[in-house]
Amino acid sequence: MNDDPVSSSGAGRVSPRTIALIGKYHSRDIAESLSLLAMNLHDRGITVIVEEVTASNSAAPVGQRSWANCDFVTIGDFASIGEKADLAIVLGGDGTMLNAARQLARHRVPLVGVNQGHLGFMTDIARCDMLTCLDALLNGLFTPEDRMLLVAEVWRDGQNIASNLALNDVVVDKGSIGRLIEFELFIDSEFIYSLRSDGLIASTPTGSTAYSLSANGPIMHPQVSGIALVPLCPHSLTNRPILVSDRNEIEIRIVQATDSRVHFDGQVTVDLRAEDSVRIRRSEFSISLLHPPGYSYFAMLRQKLHWSEKPIAH
């Protein structure tokens, strides 16, 4: 990340000089938005980096043969973006944001979301407002909010065979076969319970409005320092979601399973075997989401979840 962005007039605010653009892969919908943003930022004197896979899967601006030959942007991978960009604008839905967050968390690049997906819990800006929000963004008027990530390791025969980050959740499930899996849950090495079920979700506050919500897990405000453990269709009437501290270490030991897997944000998958262990804890990295002026988490919930507004007093 660029360590010396130009300061603006507001106390503690910075104006970005280099901005990366990251889009939803294999989507024609983002091509126009990508072109408009790139040209508008360039006209404002901003150095623009387009993520390489986004560039290869999106049509170049009118008059340009390809993004690679576009004279007002550079093409870069996530490592290059992490090294050079002051912030990244993500065009797509929450899935695109999740991928960008995992890739850039180690580089501490703040993210701004332009919603071109469906619900868009993490992508605040509507496509129609994209260009009108640029002044506030470039003047440092967006508000940063840190979101925790999880890191999960898969252990087999005493060896760590896989490790990944997750912004939303780490999910252990039964796989494609319809049989339940049996696992044991430990928190800080203390045995909690043995359960037969379709699986277990370990969710961050960010992920509490994703898969966890569908499984009757609690909605957690982003400032809550906790991890929700939500059973998937437990073969028991007494198992309920548990909220634990983000300082706890969680271990899921597979006792019996035919085709079980662990998923990271629903995008990266590792196959599991009996006696494998999935160890989950809060990551040392966090991601900063930049919200436009007037953003409210609860207003976002009311809109996305179609909650009724407060009645007007008569």
Image (tube, rainbow, N blue to C red):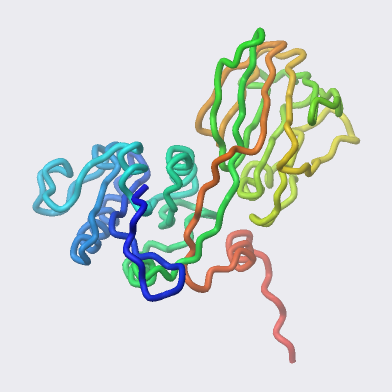
Task: Name the residue furthest bottom.
Answer: 314
121 lies left or right of 107 = right
Tally of numbered tags: 0
Quadrant of the frame with the C terminus: bottom right
Q: Can residue 128 be seen by looking at this rendering?
A: no
In the foreground, 69 or 31: 69
In terms of image quadrants, where is residue 231?
top right
Residue under the image location 27 percent in, 46 percent down: 50
Q: Is residue 182 left or right of residue 267?
A: right
Which residue of the protein is positioned furthest toward the top in this rendering? 157
Q: Position of residue 190 (x, y in %)?
A: 85, 27
Q: Residue at x 48, y 38 (%)?
A: 102
Residue 91 location in percent, x, y?
Answer: 37, 52
One can see residue 281 in this view: yes
Q: Position of residue 126 (x, y in %)?
A: 42, 63
Rendered location of residue 250, percent (x, y): 73, 30
Task: Name the side, left or right, on which 261 lies relative to 131.
Answer: right
**Which residue: 49% across, 63% down?**
291
